[in-house]
Image (cartoon, rainbow, N blue to C red):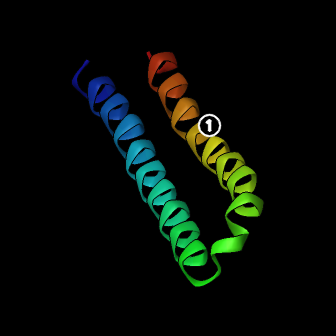
């Protein structure tokens, strides 16, 4: 029972840490690019959102895995 809870905690914890780092890096690089070239803000917005969504999907996978561990 305790190993199951540890496995669930590790799954969602590591998935959340990776997602947090990924989204932070995406936002930081996008802001850096916009700061260097302000005219590119419109071109960067959609790819930035897509990459954030893909990164967020990893957290959802980790959550699903945490729920399926028995």
9, above or below 33, in the image: above
61, above or below 69, in the image: below
Q: Quadrant of residue 34?
A: bottom right
Instruction: Residue lying at the far left in this picture: please name it.
Output: 2
**At x 64% / y 41%, what residue is drawn?**
53
14 with respect to 61 (left or right): left
Question: 15 or 47: nearer the eye?
Answer: 47
Where does the image place residue 62, in percent across and percent down from the top left? 51, 34
Q: Quadrant of residue 60?
A: top right
**At x 51% / y 37%, what residue is drawn?**
59
Question: 35 or 18: nearer the eye?
Answer: 35
Q: How many marks?
A: 1
Instruction: Residue lying at the far front in this picture: please name it.
Output: 39
Question: 36 or 58: nearer the eye?
Answer: 36
56 with respect to 69 (left or right): right
Per the image, the residue denoted by label 1 is: 57
Q: Quadrant of the N terminus?
A: top left
Q: Secondary structure at mark 1?
A: helix
Where does the image place residue 26, in percent across and percent down from the top left? 55, 62
**At x 46% / y 21%, what residue is drawn?**
69
Rate crowding at label 1 as few (under 14), some (14 to 19) or many (20 or more) other CA atoms within 10 Å. some
44 with respect to 32 (left or right): right
7, above or below 36, in the image: above
**At x 56% / y 40%, what residue is drawn?**
56
Where does the image place residue 3, in percent across and percent down from the top left? 28, 29
Q: Quadrant of residue 48?
A: bottom right
Where does the image place residue 70, in percent across and percent down from the top left? 44, 15
Question: 8 or 4: nearer the eye?
Answer: 8
């Amino acid at each position: 029972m305790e190993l199951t809870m540890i496995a669930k905690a590790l799954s969602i914890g590591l998935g959340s840490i990776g997602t947090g780092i990924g989204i932070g890096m995406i936002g930081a690089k996008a802001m850096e690019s916009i700061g260097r070239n302000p005219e590119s803000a419109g071109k960067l917005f959609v790819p930035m959102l897509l990459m954030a969504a893909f990164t967020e999907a990893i957290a959802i996978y980790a959550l699903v895995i945490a729920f399926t561990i028995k």
